[in-house]
Image (cartoon, rainbow, N blue to C red):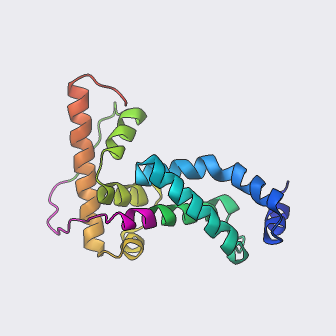
Amino acid sequence: MHEKKLIKQCLKQNRKAQETLYNKYKDAMYSICLRFTSNQDDAREALQEGFITVFTELKKFRGESGIGSWIRTIMIRNAIKVLKRKKIYFIESSKITDSITWDDNLTGDLLHEAIINLSDGYRTVFLLYEVEGYSHSEISQMLNISEGTSKSQLFYAKRKLRNFIKKHENYGIQGA
C-alpha cells in the first residue's frame, strides 16, 4: 500500500492499515529503542508507548519528511521517557581538556558492545549527538540539562568508549 494511502487509512482508524504500518516499522524502531535503553523490557515499553503515540498523533504528521523519520523521532523521545522514569543521571562538568580519537581498526560489534556498556546518561547523549545528529542545544532541551552538561556527557562517553575498546583490543576480544 502506498504510504499516503496507508496514512489516510490509519487516520480513519482502519485496524488493518495500522497493523501494516506497525509491521513495516516495528523491527527498526525496536532497534532504536533498544539502542537507547539497552534493556529489552524497556525497549518493548518504549516501542509500545511510541506506537500508541504514533496512532494518536498521526493527524499531526505534516508529511514534510517521510513517515519513518517521524516515527523514529517519536521512538527516540519515548525511549528517553522510559530512561527518565528510571532516573538517569548526568554528571555536569565544564572542564574538558583533551580530544578523543578512534582507532582505524574499530569494529562495529566492539563499538556496539562498548555503547551498551555506557551508563544511561552517557549512552543517551552519545546516541542523540553522534548517531541521531541532534545538536547540544536540542539535546539539552530534550533531557532538561544544560548544553555544558550535554557536551561533558558526550566527552566522557567517548572517553569511556575509548577505554572499553582499548581494554578489549588489548585482550584480543573482538565484538560482543
For residue 50, side relative to residue 116 (left or right):
right
- Percent x, y of residue 114: 32, 41
Residue at the image position 17 percent from the left and 69 percent from the top = 94
Left or right: 26 as drawn, with respect to 86: right
- Residue at image x 26%, y 22%? 172
Q: Quadrant of the C terminus?
A: top left
Query: Does residue 54 sit above or below 42 in this rendering?
Result: below
Q: What residue appears at the point 35 percent right and 45 percent down from the top-left corner?
A: 115
- In the picture, measured across the screen, residue 96 lies left or right of residue 114, that is left
Q: In this view of the protein, can residue 22 be seen by the observer?
A: yes
Residues drawn in magenta: 80-98
Please tell me which residue lies in front, 10 or 134: 10
Comparing 51 with 35, the one in front is 51
Residue 94 within the segment the image draws in magenta: yes
Q: Please say whether residue 134 is visible from this viewpoint.
A: no
Residue under the point 76% across and 55% down:
19
Q: Is residue 88 above or below residue 170?
A: below
Residue 132 shown left or right of residue 90 in the figure? right
The majority secondary structure of the magenta stretch comes to loop
Q: Quadrant of the N terminus?
A: bottom right
Q: Is residue 136 magenta?
A: no
Q: Quadrant of residue 70?
A: bottom right
Expressed as whole percent of the image width and height from the top left, the position of residue 47 reads 56, 57
Image coordinates for residue 12, horizontal then vertical, percent: 83, 71
x, y percent for residue 152: 23, 63
Q: Quadrant of residue 59?
A: bottom right
